[in-house]
Amino acid sequence: MIWIFPALAGLLIIYFAMRSSRFQHFAEPVLSLMVAAGLIVAFVIWINEGGNPSDTETDRSIPQARPSPEDIAVEGLAFEPNRTDTSYRATGTVVNKSSFNLDYFRLAVTLEDCPKNQCRTLGEDTALVLARIPAGRSQSFETFFTFPNRYGVEPTAPKWSYRVTEVRGRIP
């Protein structure tokens, strides 16, 4: 939102430069010098940031241990229809069995309709669950999943399957 002030100042300078010839003779050299100085500063910043590898780039090149999806357990996962026909609210508890502090994980869910043990997949969805959980602790969570309702009929015998696909954490 800070860009509004320079934009407003630029519009005022253009307006006054169009209306007053004295202001125009003063504003042109000053604006030209300001633009040139801004470009030089931007170029110097660009060279400094791009020339030296930053700490994050060197950290990425060194393989680090991370929590794996097997280190995360989802317990008591329950699904209930949300306001729309295609949305479901999921609640459960996530257990961090790793030695890392958990930041987030992705939970992939598949919805199948299985009347008379004849299953057909209705859809898949993945949710990003932000969960800041210390190592060895658990926490309840809530998220939403959306599945296409192609046939306009609610599943009569829904079958849910889920798996943790991605985990991010940090060393405590």
Image (cartoon, rainbow, N blue to C red):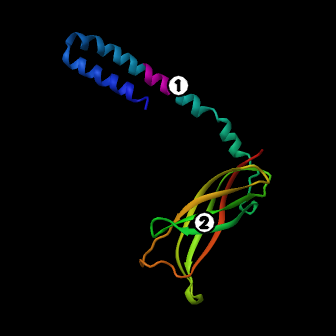
Q: Amino acid at mark 2?
A: Ala
How far, Cα to Cα, is label 2 from label 1? Answer: 45 Å
**Between 59 and 144, which is closer to the camera in this rendering?**
144
Is 41 placed above or below 130 here? Answer: above
Q: Is residue 166 magenta?
A: no
**Which element carries disc 2, helix, strand or loop?**
strand
Question: Percent x, y for residue 135?
Answer: 78, 51
Q: Is residue 39 magenta?
A: yes
Question: Percent x, y for residue 5?
Answer: 38, 25
The residue furthest bottom is 116
Is 73 placed above or below 57 here? Answer: below
* Other residues around mark 2 within 10 Å, as few (<14) / some (14–19) / many (≥20): some
* Other residues around mark 1 within 10 Å, as few (<14) / some (14–19) / many (≥20): few
Question: Percent x, y for residue 119?
Answer: 57, 84
Q: Nearer the viewer, mark 2 or mark 1?
A: 2
Question: Percent x, y for residue 25?
Answer: 25, 11
Please state, as top left, top right, bottom left or bottom right, where the N terminus lies in the image. Answer: top left
Residue displayed at 58% across by 31% down: 49
- The range drawn in magenta is 37-43
Mark seen at residue 44: 1
Q: Mark 2 and mark 1 in contact? Answer it, CB < 8 Å.
A: no
**Which element carries disc 1, helix, strand or loop?**
helix
Residue displayed at 54% across by 61% down: 144
Which secondary structure class fits the magenta region best?
helix
User: Along the polypeptide, which appears first: circle 2 or circle 1?
Assistant: 1
Residue displayed at 57% across by 88% down: 118
The residue that disc 2 covers is 108
